[in-house]
Image: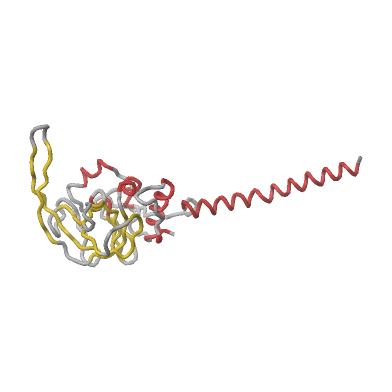
Amino acid sequence: MSEENNIMKTQKNFYRYLIAGLLPMCILISGIILNYNFGFTNFLFYNKDINLNKETGSFIKLADMYGSTLYDYVDMCDAIIMGKVISNGIGFEEDWSYDISEKEQRTMTVPLTKTKIEVDEVLYGSVNDKVINLIQMGYPNITDIEAKVKYGQIVIILLKDHGNGIDYSSVSVENGIFYIEDLKLYTLSPREDLNKYDGCDTKILLTDMNRIIKFNNLSPENSEAKSYE
């Protein structure tokens, strides 16, 4: 009887040690899976010296009605690209019509700026050409309605497609535009949720965007950005 008790005790100890050994391994594997899929185990260090007084255009106040966080802007965009501003802005005007009642419509002339962006990498979604037009509100070199990108800048832009395959706007005017200077990232936006990336490594923004895309399985292509990892 004593021998049987010893065998049972040995078996219990074996299972106890097995569980004790497997539990940390399971936790480790779960962490690796979460990190691979969502980046939740990566610790990111943001800029704490946030500048909320940037020179921005007047239209950003209206744009803020449609979102104020990176999640909002990634969710709204059709594509995210990294590229280079390869032209100075060219000004033009368009007539925009809008309804003021069921029977009356008005037309207003809107100043716009067209700037060519050479796409180096499509981080999310798709664009049709290697060179696209970024359409911004207001005349070139004037921060009246929207702050403008500048010739030679390396940019990351969250894009809205105009539907013609070549013209795009940034999501929520300045809120959808980042630029890289001296290997550091900066945003044109005055929003707190975006200013925390100012002066940071580009990877921090890309990692956060990748978390949003993967965790929420966002359209248009539910795609994973090659440069996010």
Give the quarter of the image for residue 6. top right
Name the spot of residue 115 as percent of width and height, x first. 19, 61
Name the residue at 23% across, 56% down: 165
Residue drawn at x 22%, y 53% as measured from the top left: 169
Task: In the rendered view, tell whether residue 66 sits above or below residue 133.
Answer: above
- Residue 136: percent from the left, percent from the top? 18, 54
Quarter of the image with the C terminus is bottom left
Q: In the visual, does 184 lie left or right of 9?
A: left
Left or right of residue 159, residue 205 in this image:
right
Q: Residue 11 in the image: state x and y as whole percent.
A: 80, 46
Residue 1 higher or lower than 18, as above or below:
above
The N terminus - image quarter: top right
Residue 18 x %, y %: 72, 49
Count of marks, rendered view = 0
Of residue 225 and residue 111, the one placed in the foreground of this image is 225
The colour scheme used here is secondary structure
Which one is in front, 97 or 38?
97
- Check the image and name the residue furthest to the right: 1
